[in-house]
Image (spheres, rainbow, N blue to C red):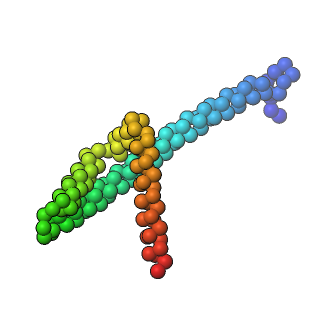
Amino acid sequence: MTDYPATGGSFGGTETGTSGIRQTAADEAQGVKHEVGTQARRLVDQVGSEVSGQASEQQKRAAGGLRGVGSQLHKMADAAEEPGMVTDLVSQAASRVDSAASWLDEREPGDILEEVKSFARQRPGLFIAIAAGAGIVAGRLTKSLMSGDQR
C-alpha cells in the first residue's frame, strides 16, 4: 500500500500541478513563437538576397544587350560609304547606347530604382509617357515573338 501525503482533502497537489503545466505550456509557446520569428527572418533574408541576385543578373544582361546594340550601331556608322547626317545620327545613337550600358553596369538595382522614383516625382508626365511607350514596344515585341513561335 502506498502512502500519500495529507493535502487537506485535495488529490496530491493538483492545483500546483496545473500551474506547472500552464507555465510549461506558456514557456513552450514562447519558444515556438521565437523560433517562428527566427525562421521568418531567415526566409525573408534568403528571398531578399535571391531577388537581389536575380535583379542584378537581369541588369547585367540588359547592359550586355545594350552593348551589343551599340556595337552594331557603330558598325553601321563605320560601314557607311558616304558620311552624312544619318551616319552622324547613328554614331551619336551608338555612343548614347554605350553610355546607357555603362550607366547600368556602374549601379546596383536599388540605386536604379531610387533614380527612377526620383525622376517620376520630378517629371510625372514624361515618366508616364515613357512608361506607356515602353509598354507598347514590349507588347509589340511579345506579340511578334509569339506569332513567330506559332509558324
Residue 113 place in picture, x, y as percent: 38, 42
The answer to whether one can see residue 97 in this image is: yes
Residue 135 on image: x %, y %: 45, 55
Please name whichever residue, 118 or 23, is drawn nearer the observer in this view of the structure.
118
Q: Nearer the viewer, residue 1 or 151?
A: 151
The image position of residue 38, as x and y in percent, is: 51, 38
Q: Residue at x 47, y 71 (%)?
A: 146
Give the answer, above or below, for where 125 lies relative to 12. Answer: below
Which of the 4 image quarters holds residue 121?
top left
Q: Residue at x 44, y 75 (%)?
A: 148
Which of the 4 image quarters holds residue 67? Answer: bottom left
Q: Is residue 14 above or below residue 123?
A: above
Q: Quadrant of the N terminus?
A: top right
Residue that protrudes farthest toward the front in the picture:
85
- Looking at the image, the residue that sits furthest to the bottom is 151
Q: Residue at x 59, y 38 (%)?
A: 32
Residue closest to the eye, 20 or 59: 59
Count of numbered circles on the image: 0
Answer above or below: position of 73 versus 46: below
Q: Image quadrant of residue 141?
A: bottom left
Would you say 23 lies left or right of 58 here? right
Q: State the image coordinates of residue 58 (x, y, percent, origin top left).
A: 36, 55
Residue 46 seen in render: no
Q: Could you tell me which residue is drawn at 49 percent across and 77 percent down?
A: 150
Q: In the orientation shown, which residue stands out farthest toward the top? A: 8
Left or right for 61, reference 77: right
Q: Nearer the viewer, residue 39 or 74?
A: 74
On screen, 103 above or below 62?
above
